Amino acid sequence: MLPPFPTPGRFAREADQLLQVFYRDHFVRGNHIVFGLVIQALINGITVDELEDYLRPMARHPVIAPIVGGYDRFITPVNGSIARRPDLVSIPEPKYVSHLFGMDCQVMHLLPAAYYLMYRFPNDFEMATLSASNGGGNNMARAALTGAIAGAINGISNLPQRLLKELRNGNELENLAREVASQNHQEAVRE
């Protein structure tokens, strides 16, 4: 059995400690932590449309704000909502999202592409992840990030079964995902 879902503040503290092993740069760690907070929110039932209102207070949260550092980290996920404004930005073939945000492996190019695809295909796991993976460049990382978001939004029950069927250790992974999803949701932002 997994431990209960941590509050966002505890998640930020523990994620920062873990990420310090891999990244010395505070900016990079902050963006990774916000990504994790987005995934946590989506698993907890926050909708894509509610995400901005959910994240905004975290920019002033006494535990989270100093760890993440900067309001901009919290608006980056919401900037992907430009996908809902094809009159402003149009990517007719969504696989070209990588051309707009960058094809390299920098997290500040990968995350905006994943967030864009989150807004473009909020209810279509397969189209979101295929668009991320077919774009070239560092498609594996972009698809993994997009898949995490799309999976958190749609839940394991709504993933195409044919994609899960042939997955190595698929049953174990599915059981683990279901266990995570069944944890205590809707925890308060305050600790």
Image (cartoon, rainbow, N blue to C red):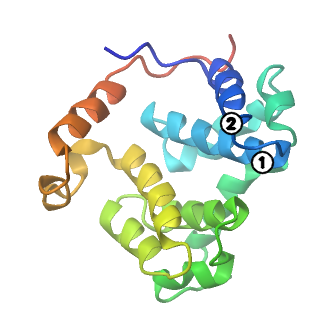
Eye-nearest disc, 2 or 1: 2
- Amino acid on which the number 1 mark rests in the picture: Arg
Report the quarter where the C terminus lies: top right
Query: Distance of mark 2 from mark 1, alpha carbons?
Result: 16 Å
Report the quarter where the N terminus lies: top left
Residue bearing the label numbered 2:
19
Furthest residue toward top: 191
Residue 149 lies, in percent from the top left, at 47, 51
Query: Who comes first in sequence, dot 2 or dot 1?
Result: 2
Tell me the residue at 43%/35% (across/down).
43
Q: Say which mark, if any, is on residue 38.
A: none
Looking at the rendered structure, the number of numbered marks drawn on it comes to 2
Query: Which is nearer the eye, 65 or 170?
Result: 170
Query: Which is nearer the eye, 3 or 48?
Result: 3
Query: Which is nearer the eye, 3 or 50?
Result: 3
Q: Would you call the spot at circle 1 few (<14 residues within 10 Å), some (14-19), or many (20 or more)?
A: many
Residue 131 lies, with reference to residue 155, above or below; the image says: below
Element type where label 1 sits in the image: helix
Residue 42 appearing in the image: yes
- Amino acid on which the number 2 mark rests in the picture: Leu
Residue bearing the label numbered 1:
73
Residue 45 lies, in percent from the top left, at 44, 34
Residue 108 lies, in percent from the top left, at 72, 62
Tell me the residue at 60%/17% (across/down).
188
Furthest residue toward front: 21
Quarter-of-image position of residue 143: bottom left
Residue 21 lies, with reference to residue 81, above or below; the image says: above
Element type where label 2 sits in the image: helix
